Amino acid sequence: MMWTAALWNEYSVGLVIAFTCALTGFAALTIERDDLHKLLLIDLVETASLAVVALIGTDLAEALILPGLVVGIAELLALSQIYLTKEELQHYKVKRLNIEVMMISPAPIIISTILVMYGIILSGFTGGGVAGLGIVFYFMSRSFTGNFHVLEIASGISWALWVASFFVFMFLPEWWYLALMGAAVGILLKVITKMSLVGAMWGEPE
Amino acid sequence: MNEIGGTPLFFLEFGDIVVYFTPFTLTLFLLALVFTVFVLISRPERQIDIAFGADAFYAKVISLPELRFRRFMSIACGLACMGAMVTGDVFDFTLLVSLVGICNVGIVAAVKSRHVQNAAYQYGLVALAGTVPLFSAAAMVAATTGTLSMIELAKDAVAIPLAARALLVLGVMGEGMAPFYAAKAEMFRAPGAPYVIMCSLSSLLIFLRVAEVILLL
Amino acid sequence: MNPEFILGAFLLLAGTVAAAFPRPRTYLNRLINLEISSWGLLLLMLSYNEALALLTFGGVSALTVYIFVRVLQKKEAAG
């Protein structure tokens, strides 16, 4: 019954391949002893699960992949930090790039400013990504010993703004333009602050 | 609607994501809510150990930053649990169960004992591995039936494949079931109830809910 | 069954086998082989025109590699 040709369409083939990948990953996971190798293999099986979600093929797949990615990366961040604490590796410093033209000249500031302005013009998710890239570049070339509290406050407020915009969309649809602008600004700020945290991780204060 | 949890009392609709309250889900929701309120207002215990060779004991005290972090994680776990108890959307359920898994790791991760950190790491690996069958099950339900809403799926016209149900149960077992592996039990050596008890309660509640979901769909 | 789907599925499978059983078994080798299966997944998403998911996964993959490289560097610095 399972071997009728009509049953094996694109979805079934894709599903078989994705599950084979997941099972291979899990098989390697059971043999593995070292903790860091296990973490890398967990990332592999996450990719296989995303493949199963992507096979849905409709717009719904995108709506399901994004939270799946967020959950995956949050867990990876948490587990890598626990690994570093467990093995007591936190004190070792990560080497920074020591390129003179980036450390001393004003070129990185100019490039970062151009990227941030372009990001603001683009607005929304793409704009936030470009602006965040500018800030990451700035932090990678210089050191950053500022406080994170302001960044966190900005991030939290922008998140609240985004959620409030969605509520306005749902319950007061006649104010849609306000909600649209609010959501775009909120997500722009949110992505900038998150990306800048990534950049700040390079130059940990000594 | 297949009335496994009792007659639905109230529907809260966010578009086609419906939050439904039957007597069963309402009970679980209230339990999670009450316990979250307990976590909010209580102070952690001081774990007391007997000093060997003398008639004395010493207490482990939790420092304030550690207390705040662990309390925050417990509240987040409680909120995720409350959401998972009443949601009427299969994907929301899997997402909230994954969140419960991460928060459980967070509750014990702030403790400085090496043994507890080791156990938290191993549990974290299994919880991450558990998200794979969870998301795969939700994706299979969406692809085969075209809907994720439990209200729609409960009508007998659509049937979800057995593999999807099995994967859902497997995922929840991987996320939460303490008797199935020792690492979660070892995590309880972390000092500071009621935060650690939230791990146990959340696993119990998500197991009860997944049983209802499987029988409903 | 367009070419992107077939190529994506093949890369996903090949990358998984390469990452699960790498020769030699070092951390860096495994990390690089993870990228092969990520590429396969990106091609799979391309075949279904899921543009937003594709871009987000590309960005998240970059972040993931960054996190792993940080852990690897700290482990190496410890000796």
Image (cartoon, rainbow, N blue to C red):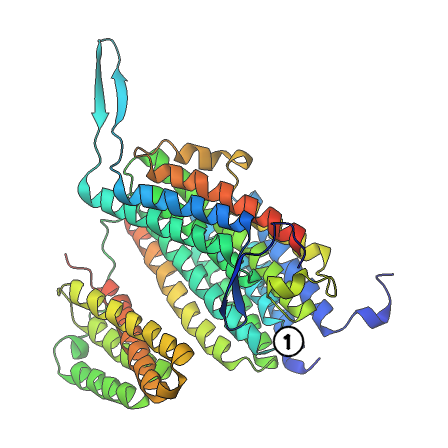
Judged from the image, the secondary structure of the residue bearing numbered disc 1 is: helix
Q: In percent of the image, x 32 and y 58: which residue is there?
A: C70
Coordinates of residue C65 in the picture (x, y in percent): 40, 64
Q: In percent of the image, x 29 and y 70: which residue is there?
A: A160
Is the residue B214 above or below the residue B183 in the image? below
Left or right, B102 with respect to B1, comes to: left
How many marks overall? 1
Asked if one can make out residue A87 in the rendered structure from this viewpoint, the answer is no
- Report the chain holding disc 1: C
Along the line of sight, which residue is nearer the eye, C39 or B83? B83
Left or right, A108 with respect to A3, comes to: left
Q: In percent of the image, x 15 and y 75: which residue is there?
A: A103
Is the residue A80 above or below the residue B138 in the image? above
Along the line of sight, which residue is nearer the eye, A43 or B75? B75
Quadrant location of the C terminus of chain A? bottom left
Coordinates of residue B58 in the picture (x, y in percent): 21, 21
Coordinates of residue A154 in the picture (x, y in percent): 21, 70
Provide the residue designation for mark 1: C7
Is the residue B196 above or below the residue C33 in the image? above
Left or right, A62 with respect to A154, comes to: right
Coordinates of residue C55 in the picture (x, y in percent): 46, 78
Question: Mark 1 belongs to which amino acid?
Answer: Leu
Quadrant location of the N terminus of chain A? bottom right
Is the residue B109 above or below the residue A179 in the image? above
Asked if one can make out residue C60 in the rendered structure from this viewpoint, the answer is yes
Q: In percent of the image, x 62 and y 76: which residue is there?
A: A57
Disc 1 residue crowd, few under 14, some 14–19, many 20+, Cα 10 Å = some
